[in-house]
Image: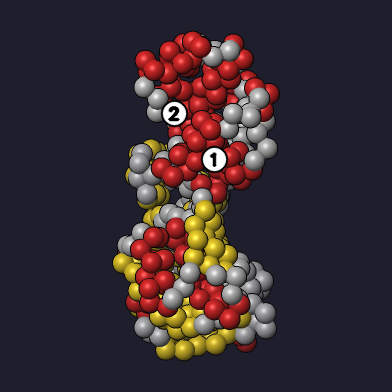
Amino acid sequence: MIKDPHIRHLLKKHALNTCTREEKEILINFFKNNDTLDIGSIPSVEEINEFLEEDPHKIDEEPSLRIYEKIIGYDKNIKREKTLKKSNSSVKRFLKVAAVFTGLMVLGVLYKNNYLSNKSSFDQEDVQQTNITLQLDNGEIKVIDTEGVQDLTDVKGSVVGKQVKNSITYSKDTEVETLSYNTLNIPYGQTFELLLSDGTVAHLNAGTSIKYPVKFLEGHSREVFLEGEAYFDVAKDKEHLFVVNNKGVNVEVYGTKFNVSTYPEDENTDVVLVEGSVSMYKTDSISNPQESTKVMLVPGVKGSFNKTNETIETKQVVTSIYTSWVHGELVFRDMTFANILKKMERRYNVSITINNDALAQEIFNASFRNEPLEKVLEYLKLTYDINYTIKDNHITIQ
């Protein structure tokens, strides 16, 4: 197999049809220009088929060659003439590479149509890093096609909701006797909308995971578990609390609009109240709230839970700054450059390294409305005299 981890990662992304145009060019050029590759270093069709847990797919040599010719962009007639002049080993190498791309395309189609189960030997971590996934109560993982429409079923096969493109809606009429949970994972570079069974809407930002009941039941609090960032519009229900459970701190509401940001790598868990009222309190679980730490928030206030010293502080803020991401905007106010780069990594699904400690701690203000990454970087370069380089999916700032 190919040892280059970046190429291996791109091969998997190609199989899932999630490669960007630039990534496809990198992948194609790797095979097109790397004449030192021997046949044994190229992943075989059999190895690809191990992902499928089915009998190996037989791929005819002639169609495979045509596919590869099309991939690398050569004129068919010229390429065929050159191919005939090549040694048998070179021809075999071309056929082998063509089979790889063909097998990857087959794999991608099967994955898109839910033929791959969570038991596949395919790297699930890579799948979850590049695709929106839904984990059922029994641990089964489904890949969400944001261009598709499908009914959602529980572990018994009963329909509990519906997915339409980049949103999921759960039915309040589902007959459920015991609490069962689904977990939705949103990778970097994407956002999603979730409508819970009680009518609560949760807008999920990039890099977010949320665990929630398929249906809220009588006699139980409406509790969800969040890691990442979400904007909630909670359906009013005076009889049932709505609780957002974060590591170390919970948010308790009856019906309101608020934003919660609780990424693991951030120093604080921030709650910004837009409408209604909420309370924050330190806790290890919903069954053990520390009432003495409870802090009430009013609209226009941000509550920040410091994960190190476990204290909660409040301050007046402009709420639209913290909810602008819901509308595809990036708004930074009095924010360190290091924190800005973290948000850019999530938004654009890139990795960023800064080699200037002083610059990382400088305070910046900026606003961007649905701008591509290149324009954001050029703005920072022209406005703040910041130099950067881009290689593949990685950005280095000097």
Q: Residues within 10 Å of mark 2 (few under 14, many from 20)?
A: some
Residue 231, percent from left and from top: 41, 67
* Disc on res. 263: none
The residue sitting at 58% across, 85% down in the picture is 312
Q: Is residue 108 left or right of residue 357?
A: left
Q: Give the vertical position of 96 relative to 240 (above or below).
A: above
**Residue type at tag 1:** Leu
Q: For the residue labelled by badge 2, is the local secondary structure a helix, a strand or a loop?
A: helix
**Residue type at tag 2:** Ile
Q: Residue under label 2, please give it.
A: 72
Q: Residues within 10 Å of mark 1 (few under 14, many from 20)?
A: some
* Res 355 seen here: yes
Quarter occupied by residue 366 = bottom left
Residue 287, percent from left and from top: 64, 70
Quarter occupied by residue 255 = bottom left
The residue sitting at 58% across, 40% down in the picture is 7
Q: CA distance from mark 1 to mark 2?
A: 16 Å
The residue sitting at 58% across, 17% down in the picture is 90
* Disc on res. 10: 1
Image quarter where the N terminus lies is top right
Residue 305, percent from left and from top: 58, 80
Residue 176, percent from left and from top: 49, 47
